[in-house]
Image: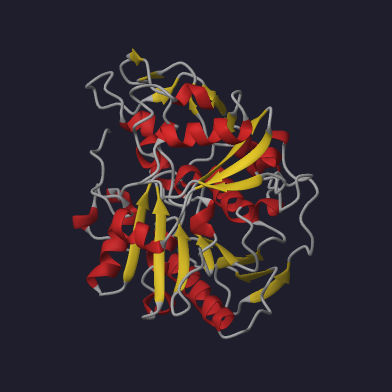
Amino acid sequence: MSRPASRYEILLVGGGAIGSRFAATDTAAVPDVALTCIDRDRVRPENLGIAAFAAADVDQPKALVLAARRRAQHRIGRGLYGDVRYALRPGLVRGLAAAVFALDNPTALRDATEAVWAAGATAIPVLVLTCGGEAGGYQVRVCVSPGVCPVCLFGELDRFLDRAAQGTSCVDTSAPRAAAVAATAAAAAAARILAGWRAGDLTLANCRLQLDPGGEAEYRIQMPAAPAPGCPVPHGNPSHGDQLDAAVHSVAAAVCELGGSINAVTVGALAEAAIRTAGADAELMLGRRAVPLAGLYCPQCGAVAPSSPLLIPAACAAWRGCTCGGVPRALGTRHVIAARDLLTATLAPATLAAWGAGHGDEFLVQGSRGRVRLRCAFEWEDLDANGNPDPPPRRE
C-alpha cells in the first residue's frame, strides 16, 4: 500500500532522549508530516530532563505519550507500544517516506534495520542518531535501502551483543548516556537532513555527519558504498544473512493476499491459507520472531505455567501464572511453527492482532507444495484507528 501523495510518513524507532526531541522538531511539526513512533519502554523518573517528558508522563509508554502530544496539536501522531521485532512489519514499512532510528540497543537496531531492508522498500532514507554527553556532539548516519545498512557498520561488540541479546538500554541500566543538549542537537541535525532530502538534496546518502563533543563545526565522513559481506541483513539478496533469515526474506516465494488486516484475519484463516497453498505439512518461518517452546516462567517468584503458541509479546501479556508482578519469560523459543498447531479451538478464532502480529504483517510458509508469502492488507487508516490503544497494565 502506498502512502497518500500529500502526506510524508516518517517512522521514529525509539522515543528516548533523542527520539522524544526529534518528535518535537520543525520537520516533525510540518502539517503534512505524519509521525509513527515505536518504543517498548515506559517513561521513567530518570528520563526527565534528559528526554522531552514531564513528570505527568512517568509510567506511561513513551510511544503513546509522543503520539498523544502530536494529536493534541491537531497533527498526525501514532504510537506503537511494543518490541520493534514484532511491531514493525513489511506493509507498514512499504508506506514510509523516511525512518529515524534513535536506539541505544544493538539488538533493537538490528531488528529495526532488518524490518526496513527486508520489506523491499527502495530509496528510503534511514537516519541513525547517536549523541554525546554534556559537552554535546552527535553522529547522524544516513543509510538508504537497499544499500549499506546500519548493521553493516556493526563492530565485533555490537555483533556479539545482538547475537547474545545482551544489548541494554538506558531503562535497563538506569544510567542515561545522553545529555539534553546533545540529544537536542542530534534531533535538530536529523530534522535538517530530512528537510533537505525532501527538497531533493541527496548528497548525504551513505554519509556520517558528525559533530565532536566540544567541537564548533560538523563534518562529513563517507561510509562504505556496498553492503558488508558478513552483514546478517539480506539486503534483498538471500546470499546475505543466516540461513533462516535468508529464507524468511527470500523474494522467491509467491505472494498470496490474506484479504484483510490483522484485525480482520483470524489465526485459523492464516493456518488454512498456509495449508491450502503450501501443503498439509506447511510451517510458518518466523525468522527472529518466536513462540514459547514450553510455556512461561516468572523469574521473580519462579512460577511456571503453560502457554498457547502466541507470539512471545502476546504470550507474555496473557500471562496469569502468578500475581507477584514479575515480567514472564519464555521457557525456550521456537522460530518455526506448523500451521496445524494453530488450528486449536481456542486459538483459531483469535485475530492475528490478538496472536501478536503487527500492522502490515506477512508470513513465509514452507511445505511440500513449495514456499508462499501470506500477506495481510495494510492501510494507514488501520493504524490511525487501532495503533493507539490504552496501554496495558504495568507488570513491574
Q: Which is nearer the eye, 260 or 143?
A: 260
**Residue displayed at 69% across by 60% down:** 146
Q: Is residue 76 left or right of residue 19?
A: left
To which quarter of the image does residue 67 belong? Answer: bottom left
**Residue displayed at 71% across by 53% down:** 235
**Residue displayed at 42% across by 41% down:** 173
Colour style of the rendered protein structure: secondary structure
Compared to 43, does 342 lie above or below? above
Outermost residue toward the front? 276
**Residue displayed at 67% across by 57% down:** 149
Q: Which is nearer the eye, 52 or 95?
A: 95
Outermost residue toward the left? 56
Q: Position of residue 395 (x, y in %)?
A: 27, 33
In this rendering, the count of numbered labels is 0
Q: Quadrant of the C terminus?
A: top left
Q: Position of residue 375 (x, y in %)?
A: 53, 48
Q: Would you say residue 122 is visible in this rendering?
A: yes
Q: Position of residue 365 (x, y in %)?
A: 60, 35
Outermost residue toward the bottom? 199
Q: Which is nearer the eye, 376 or 318?
A: 376
Q: Would you say residue 131 is visible in this rendering?
A: no
Q: Position of residue 301 (x, y in %)?
A: 30, 16
Compared to 59, does 70 lie above or below? below
